Image (spheres, rainbow, N blue to C red):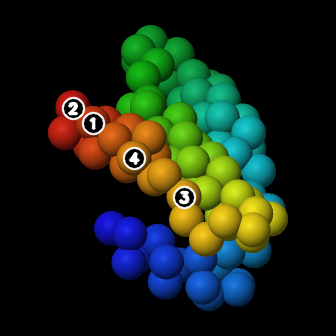
């Protein structure tokens, strides 16, 4: 997993895309989808899997990691908190 993150970080276009991504837009997108579903079928229960929040949290973790590596003089990052969240959520889904 570390080597994958290294490769992603070393790709300038990908790194810039992650660093400039607005994670709040994912939550806003979920609200739009909920309203559209409510309008189509008002009797159907509103439930959307928690994927937007999960994805937003993973992107936020990558933003923290990439920003630290880009701005710091240190050449390493403790990635355990990000990975533990990714894998614990994946196993529980």
Q: Crowding near pointer 4: few (<14 within 10 Å), some, many (20+)?
A: few
Q: CA distance from mark 4 to mark 3?
A: 9 Å
Q: Crowding near pointer 3: few (<14 within 10 Å), some, many (20+)?
A: few
Q: Is label 2 in contact with label 1 (beta carbons under 8 Å)?
A: yes
Q: Is residue 13 above or below residue 34?
A: below
Q: Nearer the viewer, mark 4 or mark 1?
A: 4
Q: x and y percent of residue 71 in the render?
A: 80, 65
- What residue is disc 1 on? 88
Q: Nearer the viewer, mark 1 or mark 3?
A: 3
- What residue is disc 2 on? 92
- The residue lying furthest to the front in this view is 74
**Residue 24 shown left or right of residue 59 in the figure:** right
- What residue is disc 4 on? 80
Q: Is residue 76 above or below residue 51?
A: below
- The answer, for residue 40, to whether it is visible in the render is no
- What residue is disc 3 on? 77
Q: CA distance from mark 4 to mark 1?
A: 12 Å
- The answer, for residue 7, to whether it is visible in the render is yes
């Amino acid at each position: 997993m570390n080597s994958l993150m290294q490769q992603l970080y070393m790709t300038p276009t990908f790194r810039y895309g992650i660093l400039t991504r607005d994670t709040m837009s994912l939550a806003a997108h979920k609200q739009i989808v909920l309203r559209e579903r409510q309008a189509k079928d008002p009797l159907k229960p509103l439930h959307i899997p928690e994927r937007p929040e999960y994805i937003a949290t993973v992107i936020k973790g990558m933003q923290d990691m990439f920003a630290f590596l880009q701005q710091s003089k240190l050449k390493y990052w403790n990635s355990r908190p990000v990975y533990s969240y990714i894998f614990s959520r994946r196993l529980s889904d």
